[in-house]
Image: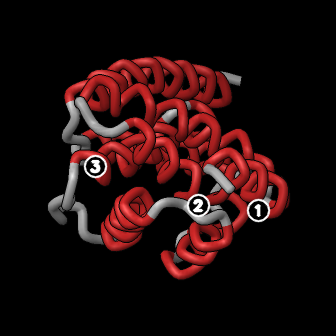
């Protein structure tokens, strides 16, 4: 068994059963971002892409079972688990130091996708559905979240990509606010 069999298994039995905005397409975007960031930072691309592929499991024990099932080599497996463990421990602890550049890259790839157009809309919809916010308030909150996340990025390419993304998002939010002002002039 190989990483390609692991990928088929994860996509068929896990990602394709997730809600559409956080399933297969999110995993593929995060994997592509991880590869790009790894190349730029000099990190191990195989470790970063494999870890990004598994990041949505949100449980190192589940990841360990998938790794064992697919007979992933011990060294690669331990590096993947290190990345996943860091990503999960980082929640609520933004200053936690990454144990490796690969762990940093995987985490930042996921953060970049969350800050991108799909992630921003997904976050706004989540706020509408779970927090009872109006759509405009939810978009403002999602925008604010993206701005805060930019400050948590450490790799040069991730910061650059986030800065460009947030500038575009700011332009969209300005348009949003301008259109909202039409209501006051009706």
Q: Quadrant of residue 162?
A: top left
Q: Nearer the viewer, residue 32 or 174?
A: 32
Earlier residue among tags 2 and 3? 2
Q: Which circle's residue, 2 or 1, is located before the other in the chain? A: 1
Q: Nearer the viewer, residue 31 or 131?
A: 31
- 166 w.r.t. 107: above or below: above
Say if mark 2 contacts mark 1, CB within 8 Å: yes
Q: Residue at x 46, y 46 (%)?
A: 110
Q: Which mark is residue 113?
A: none
**Do residues under tags 2 and 3 come within 8 Å of each other at their CB atoms?**
no
Q: How many marks?
A: 3
Which label was assigned to residue 56? 2
Tag 2's secondary structure? helix
Which residue is tagged 1? 14
Judged from the image, the secondary structure of the residue bearing numbered disc 3 is helix
Residue at 36% in and 18% down: 164
Q: Residues within 10 Å of mark 2 (few under 14, many from 20)?
A: some
Q: Which residue does the numbered mark 3 point to in the structure image?
A: 104
Q: Residues within 10 Å of mark 1 (few under 14, many from 20)?
A: some
Q: Residue at x 58, y 67 (%)?
A: 67
Measure how far apart labels 1 and 3 are at the Cα level: 24 Å
Residue 174 placement, left or right of 79:
right
Q: Is residue 185 left or right of residue 18?
A: left
The percent position of residue 126, horizontal first and vertical second, equals 66, 58
Residue 20 visible at all: yes
């Amino acid at each position: 068994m190989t990483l390609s069999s692991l990928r088929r298994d994860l996509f068929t039995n896990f990602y394709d059963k997730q809600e559409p905005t956080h399933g297969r397409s999110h995993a593929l975007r995060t994997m592509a971002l991880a590869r790009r960031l790894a190349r730029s930072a000099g990190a191990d691309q195989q470790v970063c892409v494999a870890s990004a592929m598994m990041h949505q499991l949100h449980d190192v024990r589940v990841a360990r079972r998938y790794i064992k099932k697919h007979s992933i080599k011990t060294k690669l497996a331990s590096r993947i688990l290190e990345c996943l463990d860091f990503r999960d421990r980082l929640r609520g602890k933004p200053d936690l130091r990454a144990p490796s550049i690969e762990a940093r890259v995987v985490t930042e790839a996921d953060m970049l996708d969350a800050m991108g157009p799909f992630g921003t809309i997904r976050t706004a919809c989540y706020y509408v559905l779970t927090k009872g916010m109006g759509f405009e308030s939810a978009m403002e909150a999602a925008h604010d979240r993206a701005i805060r996340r930019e400050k948590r990025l450490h790799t040069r390419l991730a910061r650059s990509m986030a800065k460009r993304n947030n500038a575009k998002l700011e332009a969209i939010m300005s348009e949003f606010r301008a259109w909202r002002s039409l209501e006051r002039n009706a």
